Amino acid sequence: MLRAYLTILLGSITTLAIQGYQFGHGNQTIYLLDAIRRTEPAFLRNDWFLTQTLQYHAAFTLLAEMLLRLKLLQPAFVLGYVALIGLFHIAWRGIVRTLGGDDTTYLASVVLYYLSAAGTALGMYQFFQDSALLPSNIANVAMLWAIYLWLSGRPNWAGICLGVAGLFHLNHAVVAVALGILLVARSLLPRPRHSLHIAGMIGAILPGAINIALAAHAKLTRSGSMPLEQFIDLYVRLRHPHHYDPSSWPAGIWVAFVWSIPPGLLVLRGEARRIMLGILAMIAVALLGAGVWFCSETLVQMSLYRFSIYAQLLACAATAVLLTKSNHKPMAMFLSCAALLVMIAVCAARGPFFGLFRMPRDDADYIRLCQWISSNTDRDAVFLVPPDEQSMRLIGRRAIVINYKAVPQLSGELPQWHRRLAQVLDLPDLRQLPRGYPRTLAAIRQRYDSLPAEHLIAVARQYGAQYIVTSRPLDALQSRRLKTDAFGSYALYDVQR
């Protein structure tokens, strides 16, 4: 038992070292906004994104709202993230054991998995996206538990875990409901392998069905749409090529995903093999219908590529079973432990993801600017900000005209996002921006910094913005500049003063 605890602890520390942890950056700058608004109804009431677009993570919003009211959000998120990593590794080890492996096999699979692009699968998806506590990450781990429980012969608990996944994330809800219906159908066959009882049936289908129904109702109450070709240009090729455009993915991502699939399929048998083939079938559908060709907006937004994380983990686990089938278990255990310790040391020295990748985030001066604005400006004021920023809404707690990060999910809401961004950047055709998230952000900042003061004033007045933020001084607005050293290189102008 002690050995099991120690191996899970080593695996968990490896994941924490490679992924790292962050709060209040990336997707959290979007997903926490609705929860804050529920606790403070006046929060961002002049912000078009929060008031006029679909906010669709209901369960996560309710959880965050409760923690905000208890004033426990940040510590609870840290503990939740660490607990999620622990649960992830308990399920992972359990899956390895159902495949016939042991603790040596489990640690070897962790090595193989993190040597495969640091655990990044197709669409740049990871189990712990953004290195934060997100609804998708909760759903990812819940669905991994469903796989483990199903393989270990506990179908009702597997169904409940599918339901938890579907409750927290809409993409998982679609898959969970489909799988729940399939499992019910299988349980009705003569002499089924697993008999799914009423708790498992309800647990698998009902939460996801509720999530889907809420999202469908919200979508139907919103009018407007965008031609599919324009949606693909904006949503897929410009805003999300890293998730939805396979032609833009680096070769290393393909290699990291594909290399372990053939040996994995050689090892997997029975239910595990069927699960793997089902995931690969989903990925094939995505590649054909939302990759080579783009057949529909809905198929794109189902984000089927995100489920490649399960195929990658299962393949690495099965490959580890193949590699450790020898009489040299002590040596395999030693080499696996040594490799994981090296990974941890490299990440401790160079940062998460072995120092090879850093997620774009706002610099320290901009964070200080947001903090100053939160305490020293009218809470109903609207700000024109560099559109590559992410933090003004969450940290500054002020409405903004537009940023690139917070993109609506519905095609009927995308025209407003496109119009605002194009007008702020004075760039009618946003397709001129370079592809690739970091390159796009850099180009947006460069374009915004090059704009004359007259253009920024005109856009600010058009959208009712009282303040303009720039990263360079504007001579034409020096008389309206708020002079303080609190935010370093940034300049803040009150255009209504």
Image (cartoon, helix red, strand yellow):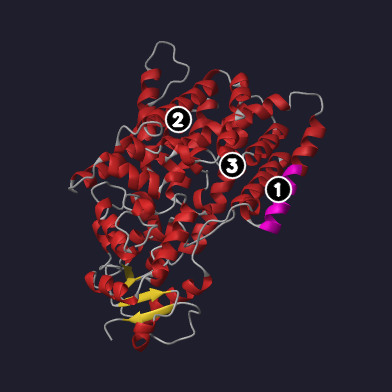
Q: Marks 3 and 2, Cα distance to the nearest angstrom?
A: 17 Å
**What amino acid is found at the position of numbered circle 3 in the picture?**
Gly
Who's the residue at 40% across and 23% down the image? 183
Place of residue 46 in the rendered image (x, y in percent of width and height, measured from the top left):
25, 68
Quadrant occupied by the C terminus: bottom left
- Disc on the earlier residue, 2 or 1: 2
Q: Relative to residue 238, is residue 122 drawn left or right?
A: right
In the figure, 179 relative to 422: above or below? above
Which labelled disc corresponds to residue 223?
none
Mark 3 and mark 2 in contact? Answer it, CB < 8 Å.
no
Q: Is residue 458 magenta?
A: no
- What residue did someone put label 2 on? 283
- What residue did someone put label 3 on? 119
Q: Nearer the viewer, residue 434 or 127?
A: 434
Numbered disc 1: secondary structure: helix
- Our reading of the magenta stretch's main secondary structure is helix
How many C-alpha atoms fall within 10 Å of the one at disc 3: few (<14), some, or many (≥20)? many
Q: Quadrant of residue 393?
A: bottom left
How many C-alpha atoms fall within 10 Å of the one at disc 2: few (<14), some, or many (≥20)? many
Place of residue 49 in the rendered image (x, y in percent of width and height, measured from the top left):
29, 60
- Disc on the earlier residue, 3 or 1: 3
Q: Nearer the viewer, residue 291 or 153?
A: 291
Q: Which residues are magenta?
A: 339-350
**What amino acid is found at the position of numbered circle 2 in the picture?**
Ile
Place of residue 241 in the rendered image (x, y in percent of width and height, measured from the top left):
43, 45
Numbered disc 3: secondary structure: helix
- What residue did someone put label 1 on? 343
Q: Marks 3 and 1, Cα distance to the nearest angstrom?
A: 13 Å
Who's the residue at 51% across and 68% down the image? 363
Kindly give the residue lying farthest to the top in the view shown: 190
> Visible in this render: residue 37?
yes
